[in-house]
Amino acid sequence: MVSAVFHSPLSPAAESAAIKTEATHADSTGATSQNDLKNQTIQPKLIRQPASAGKPPFDWRGLWLAVLPPVFGLGLLIGVWALVSISTASSIPSPTETFKQAIVIFSDPFYSKGPNDQGVGWNILASLERVAVGFGLAAAVGIPVGFMVGRFEFLSRMFNPLISLLRPVSPLAWLPIGLLVFKGANPAAIWTIFICSIWPMIINTAVGVQRVPQDYMNVARVLNLSEWKIVTKILFPSVLPYMLTGVRLAVGTAWLVIVAAEMLTGGVGIGFWVWDEWNNLNVKNIIIAIFVIGIVGLILEYALIKIATAFTFEEVKS
């Protein structure tokens, strides 16, 4: 019984052959395992190596999508303009004639031959100066009033009917009041800019204050913060996006109104320049002025979008 457990039933020759077979199998298995280990070690290194060491391919599709739509839009505008010029027997100047006239005008935009004969550059600067003064006064009054209207319910109930009554009035309807009060064309134009710019800033600022989360105000009460701390630390950062939206709307409205106001008041300005060219039946300069007004308005809008994006930390869409 004991010998059956501890002694191999094989003969010595068979036992030695079996030991050699196992040794050979172990050697081959070990070699295979080492090769597999080497392959496993080398393979990740091959995977980590980039397929190509060059730069990524250029995004042609993105370029086409960014460039082609605006080009097609401008081409459509010029094509319609040319067709209108042909159909009206050239009473409307063609794009080519207008472009040649624009080169002549902008070759010397800052000439001055008297108060009523100045280059387009001086007229643009005069209009921008009026817009800046009127808009600055509107911001200095409208933004604090918007904070108070949005902060206190009593003021909100008091001012809402007045704003609803006066906001729909055409800005040019305020021009005669300005002429009557200020006895001058320039302050009357600034007054018109002021009165049409103040409403968007009051409304948007008040809406922003009213939409501040109530939890913020509850924390302010718990901490017993002063009204100045509430405005500077809680309300102003939360209301800033709404306030900048009101500023953008106000600037766009101001630039629209100044052209019409200057047509009626005269003096130096892009609006007066348009009206003066109409009196001279110079349609080319009128079309050039239309493009100048549009480009200046576009630049103002783009600049305010960049400012809004910088202060609100989010993308601001036009």
Image: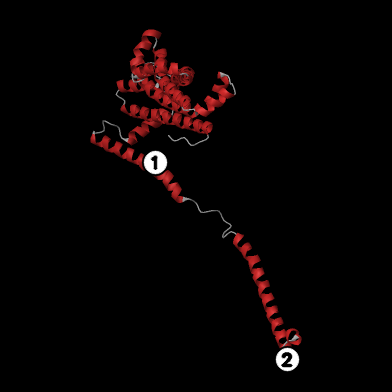
Foreground residue among 50 and 70: 50
Q: Position of residue 88 (x, y in %)?
A: 24, 33
Tell me the amino acid under the disc marked 2: Ser
Which quarter of the picture shows residue 176?
A: top left
The crowding category of the residue bearing disc 1, from other C-alpha atoms within 10 Å (few below 14, some 14 to 19, many at least 20), is few
Mark yes or no: residue 111 visible.
no
Foreground residue among 116 and 242: 242
**Residue found at the very far front of the displayed protein:** 1
Q: What residue lies at 46% left-to-right and 26% top-to-bottom?
A: 208
Q: Which residue is mark 1?
A: 70
Foreground residue among 148 and 133: 148
Colour scheme used in the picture?
secondary structure
SS assignment at label 1: helix
Q: Position of residue 40 (x, y in %)?
A: 64, 67
Q: Which residue is mark 2?
A: 11
**Viewport quadrant of the C terminus:** top left
